[in-house]
Structures are given as structure tokens and as C-alpha cells.
Amino acid sequence: MSIPHGIRTLGVLGAGQMGLGIAFVSALRAKVPVLLHDRSPEQVTKGLALMDKLLAKDVSKGRITTEAAKDARERVTVVDAKGLRDVDMVVEAVSENLLLKQSIFRSLAAELRPDAILASNTSSISITKIAAAAVPEGLSAASEQGKASAGRVVGLHFFNPVPVMKLVELISALQTTPETLGRAESFAIACGKEVTTSKDVPGFVSNALLMPFINEAIMCLEKGTATRDHIDTTLKLGMNHPMGPLQLADFIGLDTCLAIQQTLYEGTRDSKYRPSILLERMVDAQWYGRKNGKGFYEYN
Ligand code: CAA
């Protein structure tokens, strides 16, 4: 049976909270074999243990059968970087660092088949800049081959926790071809997600709106406008947000919030996006939020 996205094997690069979640929904919902790679073996072990836990919970709640859970788990294979060569699409979910992402896309463009889609789960970095790195060395970005290579790059922005959040934001680089965009969108739909599209502006729609909100909350705390708990409770009970902004910042990761805010500030040169000093200091102190146990709250 032909499938609109044409993805018979997916590669996922990065087994952190986002990469693992993407592997999970791809294997369980889109039913696509997933080759998962992370340079840290500990991260892979941790990720697979979480996947087993999530599948077991879905079985215990009667949402899926034991067989469906087993099939989903068996669709996920851990590979080394070279193991991604034959995939039809790769989703990159490494940390928010432009140079790192560009170097990854440079290698992917050189090593993967020319028709493979190269998607980034970046939350704020320009997809156009990432796509520019996907032109193999020696080729002009304006040549037919150069345009074709960069044209398979797209932004596919999932939200945390990926198994729960229903949205994927789809971002087209200047170079992205309509075919790449269409296939990436149908893949996200096959993963059970609703898709919104955004232009390639710093932070896209989601973080251009969310990050100033989180930053204002941190500034309220910094200025002593209210306590941590009162800031979060105001938004939770007053506006029905599932988490208060400080709790959400911890959940996303304070290092990730700062990296996104820096991208917004540098990309727009607009002072309304300037990260708060308190956030910078917390990241200086290596307090990254829930992921390492200390942020605005303490976690065990
Ligand atoms: N992975 C998988 N599932 C998870 C999870 C995780 N990390 N954390 C919670 N869940 C599941 C729980 O297992 C539970 O599932 P069941 O219904 O099957 O039992 C469900 O989510 C609800 O969890 P809880 O009952 O424990 O807690 P809750 O009702 O407070 O919900 C929450 C937890 C879904 C995280 C909710 O607090 C929420 O929606 N928070 C806001 C999350 C959000 O805004 N995410 C976007 C962040 S921005 C981003 O990701 C992108 C970016 O670019 C920065």
C-alpha cells in the first residue's frame, strides 16, 4: 500500500526527551521502523527505558494491545551514525546550537540518499541557515543540484512531551521544495499530530509568543513582583494554564529557554526578546531545570 509521506524508514538523531518522543510516536502511531542514534550510549539506554515505560502504561490503560506495544518497540533499532545512511527521512533533535546543527546537516547531505528528507526539530533556529549547510561541498547553493539538496530540508517542530502534545509546527526554509513540505506534513499527521505552519522567523509562531511570556515571568520573580508560587498559581488558576510559566521553563529546560531567547534576540535585534539576567545566571550555575534536578523548583 502506498503511503503519502513515502517514509519506509525514519532516522532520529538524538535520544533526549524530544528525539525519544519523536521515535515513540513514529514507531507507535505512524508504524514506521525507526533507526535511533545518539552519541551518548547512556542517553540511549535512558530513552529506551522511558519508551518501555510509556508503552507499558498505554497497555495498562487499555489504549493499545500488548502486541501493538511489542511491535512498536521492535520497530526501534539503535544504530551508530553510519546506520542512518539508507533512511527516507531523518529528524534531527540535538541541542539548540546552530553550528552543531549545520555540521550535522552537512554530513547528512553528503551521506544520505539525495531524495531523503532532512528535518530539524529546532525550536527557533533558522531552517534557511540549516538548509544552507546541506549543500555538499564544492556545489553552488544556486546550482540545480545545490537547490535540490537544500530543498529537502524542513522544520518539523514537535512539543514536549511529544506523546501527549498534539501539535507539530511545520516550517519551510526559503529553499524547501513543496514536495518536501507535503511529505513532512503527511508524516506528522501519520504520527497523530495536527499541523500548523509558520514562516521561518526567529522562534517561529510558538516560541516568538511563548518565550517573551516565560521571560516576563522570570523578570517578575527577579523584580520581586511576586513569589515563584504566586506567579505560577496566577497563570494556572487565573488563566487555566496546565503549568505556570516558571514550572514550564523548568520543564522545557532553562538552557534550552536561554538558547531560544538568544536566537530570538539576535535574530530580531528587538530588546523585547532580551533574556533576563536571572535566567542567564541560573544557566551559568548549570541549573537546567527538571532535566538535572534544579531549576526554579527542585526535582528528585
Ligand atoms: N512523556 C510522556 N508522557 C508524559 C510525560 C512525558 N514526559 N509527562 C506526562 N506525561 C503524560 C502522563 O503519563 C499522563 O498520561 P496518562 O493520561 O496516560 O496518564 C499525562 O501526560 C498527564 O500527566 P499527569 O497526569 O502526570 O500530569 P498533568 O495532567 O499535569 O499533565 C503535562 C502533564 C501534559 C506535561 C501538562 O502539565 C502540560 O500540558 N503542560 C504543558 C506542556 C507544554 O506546554 N509543553 C510545550 C512546551 S514548549 C515545547 O515543547 C517546544 C519548545 O520549542 C520549547
Image (tube, grey):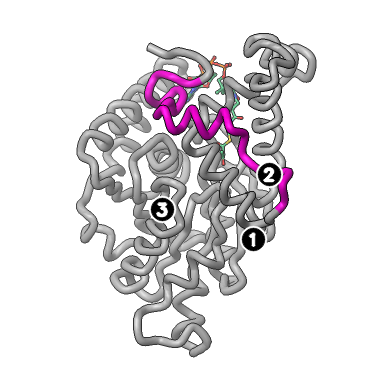
Judge left or right: residue 189 versus residue 59.
right
Q: Secondary structure at mark 3?
A: strand
Q: Is residue 14 found inside the magenta-colored segment of the image?
A: no
Q: Amino acid at mark 2?
A: Tyr
* Label number found at residue 19: none
Judged left or right of residue 86, residue 131 is right
Q: Amino acid at mark 1?
A: Asp
| The image quadrant in which ligand 1 is located | top right
**In x, y percent, where is residue 73?**
30, 35
Query: Viewer-nearest of labels 2 and 1?
Result: 2
Residue 75: % across, % down:
30, 43
The reply to whether callout 2 and callout 3 are in contact (CB within 8 Å) is no
Few, some or many C-alpha atoms within 10 Å of disc 2 (few <14, some 14-19, many ≥20)?
A: many
Disc 3 target residue: 92
Q: Which residue is mark 1?
A: 200
C-alpha separation, residue under disc 1 versus residue under disc 3: 17 Å
Tell me which residue sits at (31%, 67%) in the image.
107
Going 45% across and 87% down the picture, which residue do you hit? 140
26 sits to left or right of 113: right
Q: Nearer the viewer, mark 2 or mark 3?
A: 2
Question: On residue 273, which mark appears?
Answer: 2
Most foreground residue, 273 or 197? 273
The residue shown at (56%, 45%) is 260
Q: Is residue 163 visible?
A: no
> Which region is colored magenta?
270-295
Which image quadrant: the C terminus?
Answer: top left
